[in-house]
């Protein structure tokens, strides 16, 4: 008798995420990359991405690779070689943009705040007033390091008032939190197939103002990461410049259909918000302390302070939860010992309750009765 296939674990991570069965099944075909069916699929995906970002004079340009490839491509394509970027940093992904600029030799400055503190729009204004050489501001929508929601609307206003251009890493928010690029006056938003749009990993993309992208010819430091070239080629031929991840695009196309059926950003955002509420309330009921106060918590991923009890060892906790079918994520904070639990992907309240139940049993096994964290001096959250 054939054994039932073991169920995949639930991924409570920042991505790749749990995907729908039908999204996985959408990959069970082979497509010719120059075939009309694949060309139509590319066009459909690009059109849907534009709609999610507010429509109008926008274009979507998909790129082979993970999200970082799209971020690096956007910084290299939009910032001219004589330009300068102000990067707002309150976590690993902001810091990664600074590293990208360093590697490709784009002038940049950073405005840093602690991992649990959003950037202050007034501080951005001060930096822009002091340095007229800054042409662009780059920021992260939801900084996935902590799960903090950064004030995109307020920063966008400051950037526009100073006549500079905004680039937004909305990787972990796009599809769950509204981004209206027209209202924001933003040149480009960067995201990927495998976060809130619930596709499989392998495609990064940008949605950009067509007029802004049109002015970027010759900026890029790299051929494969030249978004202007990728865009022009796609417009001309309907095809990708180099071998496309055909199966990933097919899964993405299907995932976007599920996204529309769920009610788009409103529907998906509401499910993630419910997941996050259940998760945060449940963690607190177990005695855990979350890093962020509710008003700074994006409904994407929750950072939990590690319990001070020496019987709590993250590796043991992680392994025990994994055996029970729930995969969580180590912390990435530099300031505090922590771990993270995501609430995005093809998951609902039942899976959140399931994960919390697995945590309760595991804590009992470990003999941890008090989940309170080590007191941290000078805490801001
Ligand atoms: C996931 C993520 C990225 C991209 O990471 P990859 O590992 O390259 O996919 C970039 N920025 C943010 C905010 C992210 O959450």
Image (spheres, rainbow, N blue to C red):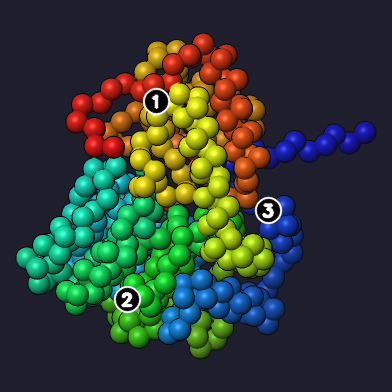
Q: Which residue is mark 1?
A: 306
Q: Residues within 10 Å of mark 3 (few under 14, many from 20)?
A: some
What label does residue 20 carry, if any? 3
Residue 341 image position (x, y, % from top left)? 49, 38
Residue for point 51% across, 81% down: 234
Residue 33 figure quarter: bottom right
State whether label 1 is within 8 Å of ligand 1.
Answer: no
Residue 272 image position (x, y, % from top left)? 54, 51
Q: Nearer the viewer, mark 1 or mark 3?
A: 1
Q: CA distance from mark 2 to mark 3?
A: 34 Å
The reply to whether residue 321 is visible in this rendering is no
Residue 326 image position (x, y, % from top left)? 60, 34
In the image, residue 165 sits, relative to residue 100, either above or below, namely: below
Residue 270 figure quarter: bottom right
Q: CA distance from mark 2 to mark 1?
A: 40 Å
Residue 113 image position (x, y, % from top left)? 21, 47
The reply to whether residue 366 is visible in this rendering is yes
């Amino acid at each position: 008798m054939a054994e039932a296939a073991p169920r995949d674990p639930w991924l409570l991570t920042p991505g790749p995420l749990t995907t729908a069965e039908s999204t996985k099944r959408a990959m069970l075909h082979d497509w010719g990359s120059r075939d009309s069916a694949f060309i139509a699929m590319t066009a459909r995906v690009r059109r849907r991405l534009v709609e999610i970002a507010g429509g109008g004079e926008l274009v979507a340009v998909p790129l082979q690779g993970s999200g970082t490839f799209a971020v690096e491509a956007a910084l290299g394509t939009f910032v001219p070689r004589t330009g300068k970027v102000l990067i707002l940093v309150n976590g690993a992904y902001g810091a990664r943009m600074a590293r990208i600029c360093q590697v490709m030799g784009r002038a940049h400055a950073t405005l840093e705040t602690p991992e649990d503190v959003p950037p202050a729009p007034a501080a951005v204004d001060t930096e822009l007033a002091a340095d007229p050489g800054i042409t662009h501001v780059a920021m992260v929508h939801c900084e996935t390091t902590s799960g903090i929601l950064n004030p995109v609307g307020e920063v966008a206003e400051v950037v526009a008032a100073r006549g500079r251009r905004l680039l937004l890493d909305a990787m972990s928010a796009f599809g769950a939190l509204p981004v209206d690029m027209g209202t924001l006056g933003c040149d480009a938003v960067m995201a990927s197939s495998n976060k809130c749009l619930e596709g499989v990993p392998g495609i990064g993309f940008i949605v950009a103002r067509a007029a802004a992208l049109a002015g970027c010819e010759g900026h890029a430091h790299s051929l494969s990461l030249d978004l202007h070239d990728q865009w022009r080629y796609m417009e001309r031929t309907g095809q990708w410049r180099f071998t496309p991840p055909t199966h990933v695009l097919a899964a993405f196309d299907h995932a976007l259909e599920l996204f529309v059926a769920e009610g788009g950003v409103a529907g998906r955002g509401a499910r993630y918000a419910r997941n996050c509420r259940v998760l945060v309330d449940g963690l607190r009921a177990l005695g855990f302390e979350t890093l962020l106060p509710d008003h700074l918590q994006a409904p994407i991923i929750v950072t939990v302070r590690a319990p001070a009890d020496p019987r709590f060892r993250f590796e043991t906790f992680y392994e025990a939860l994994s055996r029970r079918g729930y995969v969580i994520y180590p912390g990435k904070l530099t300031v505090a010992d922590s771990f993270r639990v995501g609430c995005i992907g093809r998951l609902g309240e039942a899976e959140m309750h399931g994960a919390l139940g697995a945590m309760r049993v595991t804590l009992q096994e470990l003999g941890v009765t008090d989940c309170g964290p080590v007191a941290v001096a000078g805490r801001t959250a």
